[in-house]
Structures are given as structure tokens and as C-alpha cells.
Amino acid sequence: MQIKSAKFVVSNQNVSNCPKTNIPEYAFIGRSNVGKSSLINMLTNQKNLAKTSSRPGKTQLINHFLINDTWNLVDLPGYGYAKVSRSQKNIFQKFITNYFKERKQLISAFVLIDIRHSPLPIDIEFINWLAQNSISFSIILTKCDKLKPNIVQSNLEKYKQKLQEDWEILPNFFITSSSKFLGKEEILDFINEINLSLTKK
Ligand code: GTP
Ligand code: MG
């Protein structure tokens, strides 16, 4: 899929204030600093569409971006950011879970995981929560430029094995690097195929 236009629409903390338009929506979620905003910029060929930072906790709102005037891409705050206060963490947690539970336009989520880490309980818990709530999702392994290809493959296998402990069917996995533009076409083609299947319905 070619990205012809990518425009910021709105930021807010409350799912009820999200755009009312009834177009397909795809959300990017994962731990703070995993590379959600960078991936969105990479997918849309823009440097600063989504705000990035080397310090975790940069994205604090639900951010909607309209792509090709036909679908929305959503940048979310990271979960598990240790430096915000407990009460702020609860507010974050609440509006993220409300977003996933209530947003009817959400077609599929992408859970981003830093390829360098072994499976972390917080990521596995979030993935299991999505699956238990019947929310469609894929997994995007980020920052793959930071490891040798054979380690990328062995870490990918570790994630698959870990998820197989709980689930018979595995989600799609995408291997990505925002700095090397790796995985871009695969993700955009995946979204395009779903969008096409929705228009045929
Ligand atoms: P929050 O908004 O704080 O939840 O973070 P985020 O998940 O949006 O992460 P962000 O895109 O801001 O990136 C965090 C840091 O990781 C930045 O310093 C990025 O430059 C770096 N980064 C993101 N993706 C990649 C990647 O593919 N490769 C490398 N080497 N660095 C990356
Ligand atoms: Mg961000």
C-alpha cells in the first residue's frame, strides 16, 4: 500500500472523544519506549508525525492519524512506565483498556515488543488480556537492527514458544526496524488486505 497522505486528527484521554467517523482503525500499543511512535513515522514516511523521545513516557494521549483519507492509525501511550505516579499509571491503564474495550472502529491492534528482551510478564499479560477479550492483534518485534539476524530469529522463536504455552493459534509476527525501514511493506500490505476485505463485505 502506498501512503499518499497522513494527517494528525485529534489527541485525547477519553475514548468517547475519539473521532466519530466510521472508518477502520488500527492501534499501536506496547511498553513505553518500545518504538510505537517511531514505527508510525516509519510507516507513514514522516519524521515527526508522531512525537518520539529517547525518554519513556512521551506519548500520553490517544492520538488519531488519518491515512489516505480512508483509515485511522492510533498511537497510544506505553504501558508499564515506572516513573509516573501510581495514580497516573492507573489513569493511563484505565483509558487504554477503555479504548480497547469500547472502540468499535478498532479492526486490529499491533502489540509492539522490543526484540532484545526475553518475554516479559507485562507483555504476556497484555497479550493474554487482548485474546481473552476477543480483540484481534498481531505482534511487532521492534528495534531488530540492534541484534544479529540469527539472534532475531531465536528471540522470535522464544516468543512463539511462550505464547504456545497458553494459546493454540499464534498471532502474526512482524520483524521490524524503524531506523532501517524493515517490515514496512509487510505491515502496510497486511492492513491493506484487511481494508479490502472490509469493503467487500
Ligand atoms: P512512549 O511514547 O514513551 O510510550 O514510547 P514509544 O513506544 O512511542 O517509543 P518511541 O518511538 O518514542 O521510541 C523510543 C526510542 O527508541 C527513541 O529513542 C527511538 O529513536 C528509539 N527507536 C525506536 N524504534 C527504533 C528502531 O527500530 N531502532 C532503533 N535503533 N531505535 C529505535
Ligand atoms: Mg510514543
Image (spheres, rainbow, N blue to C red):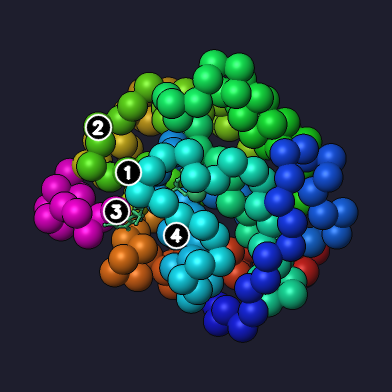
Q: Position of residue 120 (x, y in %)?
A: 33, 27
Q: Which residue is mark 4?
A: 39
In this rendering, the answer to whether 36 lies above or below 125 is below
- Crowding around mark 1 (Cα neighbors within 10 Å: few <14, some 14 to 19, many 20+) is some
Task: Please say if the residues under marks 2 and 3 sit with CB atoms less than 8 Å apart.
Answer: no
Closest to the camera, between mark 4 and mark 2, is 4
Indicate which disc, 2 or 3, sits on the residue closer to the N terminus.
2
User: What residue is drawn where x is 56% and y is 23%?
Assistant: 89
Quadrant where the image shows the N terminus: bottom right
In this rendering, the answer to whether 147 lies above or below 114 is below
Q: Amino acid at mark 2?
A: Ser
Mark 3: is the Cβ under 8 angstroms from ligand 1?
A: yes
Residue 60 found in image quarter: top right
Indicate which disc, 4 or 1, sits on the residue closer to the N terminus.
4
Secondary-structure class at tag 1:
strand
Whether residue 24 is visible = no
Q: Amino acid at mark 1?
A: Asp
Task: Please say if the residues under marks 3 and 1 sit with CB atoms less than 8 Å apart.
Answer: yes
Indicate which disc, 4 or 2, sits on the residue closer to the N terminus.
4
